[in-house]
Amino acid sequence: MSTHALSGLELVPTSDEQQNGKDYTSDQEVRWCPGCGDYAVLKAVQSFLPDLGLRRENIVFVSGIGCSSRFPYYLDTFGMHSIHGRAPAIATGIATSRPDLSVWVVTGDGDALSIGGNHLIHALRRNVNLTILLFNNRIYGLTKGQYSPTSEEGKVTKSTPVGSIDHPFNPVSLALGAEATFVARTIDSDRKHLTSVLAAAAAHRGAALVEIYQNCPIFNDGAFDDVKGPEAGDHLVRLEPGLEVTVGGRTWLHDPSAVDPSDQFALSRMSEGTDRVPVGVFRQVQRPTYDDQAREQVATAVDASTASREERLTALLHAGDTWTVV
């Protein structure tokens, strides 16, 4: 039996309604390029969702614009293909008004970190009860191969023919800087690790961001070969609580539950100047959520007010500083 990160609700199907991945597969033809990493993530999500123990009508996926943003079409849940970069804002409204829903955001490195950057960091800062899947292929795929906010310096693309001069975002560092309460990284081709990270993110109450290294075989093929190939073990650092980590000559034991994110942030910079890439859960702490507190304020205001509408309006107009014009 699963409770998910909802308001104490247990929406578990009865024994004769047990679900599987096919129940979460829509009748829409999946249209991504052959070999796209999105296929692997979609299959993992479809297979994982039954484990939440929720009914399909209590799950909603909101996407922005991009290849990954086709996700809602391929899932047999509620969903919305929304506006470029604005998925976190729309999802915030859903999560605040509907505490009975499990709300997910599917976005890409261009959608989330360029036009949508402000919406993303504030959803994380506010700790809205959302699970955000950020597909990072380090390129604009839908618009055919321009450099993105995560493309490495010197990257030659259609929009940077002599190499990008932009310094890229590190999505995990960005999320930790916004003090997200759950931050993780995983890889599209590692089904076991991807599923375990999804499970941890879904169980977290608050804003959870999962960066997924995702291959674009057409416009940026092999971007993550160093952590996917036969020698990936030489480069990957699989994070677990208590793991001894060394960054910049300093060694400590990884603690994702530490309230101060300083060590977690330092860990997110491990790959800067080295060939070591950490994957797993960087941060997992508890803090009151925006949507819970907003609903509490509304309930308190309604319960506390026994005066008539006219009396409340008069009191509001005359509250605080007033001026007399003579």
Image (cartoon, rainbow, N blue to C red):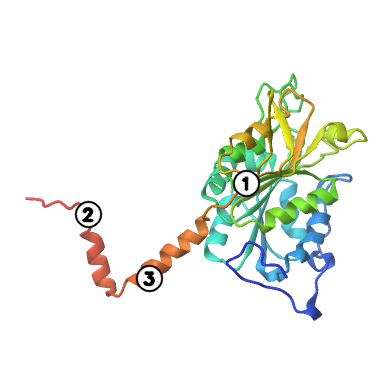
Q: Which residue bears the numbered disc 2?
A: 320
Disc on res. 125: none
Q: Nearer the viewer, residue 255 or 173?
A: 255
Tell me what residue is drawn at x 71 percent, y 67 percent.
2
Q: Earlier in the sequence, mark 3 or mark 2?
A: 3
Q: Secondary structure at mark 2?
A: loop
Q: Position of residue 33 (x, y in %)?
A: 85, 45
Label 1 – label 2 distance at C-alpha? 42 Å
Marks 3 and 1: which is nearer the front?
Answer: 1
Establish if 262 lies above or below 56: above
Q: Is residue 163 visible?
A: yes
The quarter of the displayed image where residue 98 is located? bottom right
In this rendering, would 309 be left or right of 150?
left
In this rendering, would 211 be left or right of 41?
left
Hey, which residue is sitting farthest right in the picture?
A: 230
Q: Which residue bears the numbered disc 1?
A: 257
Q: Which residue bears the numbered disc 3?
A: 302
Establish if 75 lies above or below 115: below
Q: Count neighbours of disc 3 (C-alpha within 10 A) and say few if under 14, some if 14 to 19, many if 20 or more.
A: few
The quarter of the displayed image where residue 156 is located? top right
Label 3 – label 2 distance at C-alpha? 21 Å
